[in-house]
Image (spheres, rainbow, N blue to C red):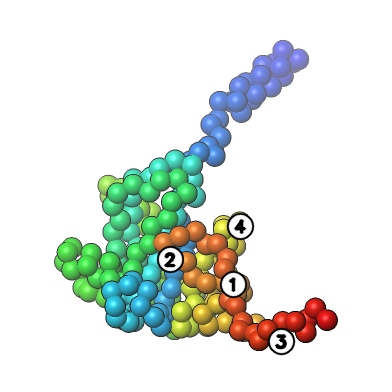
Amino acid sequence: MRKIFRFFMLLALVSIIAIPGFSDCAAQVAINEFLADPARDWDGDGALSSRDDEWVEIVNLGKTAVDLAGYRLADGEGRPVWRYGFSGVLEAGAIRVVYGSDARAWEEANGFAVYGLSLNNTGDRIALYRIAGTDTALVDGYTYAEVAVRDDRAIGRRIDMPAVWVVFDANNPCTSTCVPPGSGCYPTPGSANTCTTATESRSWGSIKSIYR
């Protein structure tokens, strides 16, 4: 009995050792930040457009580069409706931003109905998928409510805690009803979600009075 017991204990130990663990070098592409209700010219084309100035960022949270062929953005629930298809390589830690004007151009070039990113101001879902052969897999997604995306408010991950989402609301401060909560930071399309807070104009006399 002891020999049999030792045999199964050894077999179990070998099995545990043989099971590959999750590599911390595995690449992970995710939605990083998005803005659904633009109130300024975010894409820099010289004109404000509720369609063309929406934007979505993706980020590579992993430690290896990722080939973005097959990655696509969609909005809404249910069967995905493609809004943009990625290409090229996303390096580890790198960010890629897609404006509504980019999505419109992609839709036109690929024979889709032209809506841009189509992020509803009343609330919607933004999703990132990966197509590989006949498989279509949901990679990441976020469902938002209307209050969090009012004029020039973006929703994104905290750079120090990527699992935590906040509203970048320096252009249009949130009240206590914002979900996720407001951060007081500015949106940062195309760059890391570092926090630059809004500033308040103060007279020199009022500033001096603080230190009296």
Q: Amino acid at mark 4?
A: Met
Which amino acid, by three-letter code, is at mark 2? Pro
The disc at residue 197 is 1
Q: Which of the two marks, 1 or 3, is nearer to us in this view? A: 3
Q: Amino acid at mark 3?
A: Gly
- The CA distance from mark 2 to mark 1 is 15 Å
The answer to whether one can see residue 116 in this image is no
Closest to the observer: 113 or 87?
87
Q: Are marks 1 and 4 in contact (CB under 8 Å)?
A: no
The residue at which mark 3 appears reads as: 205
Q: Specify the label residue 29 is tagged with.
A: none
Classed neighbour count for the residue bearing mark 2: other residues with Cα under 10 Å, few (<14), some (14–19), many (≥20): many
Please state which of the two labelled residues, at mark 2 or mark 4, is closer to the viewer.
Answer: 2
Earlier residue among tags 1 and 4: 4
From the image, state whether disc 1 or disc 4 is nearer to you: 1
Residue position marked by numbered label 4 in the rendering: 161
CB under 8 Å between discs 4 and 3: no
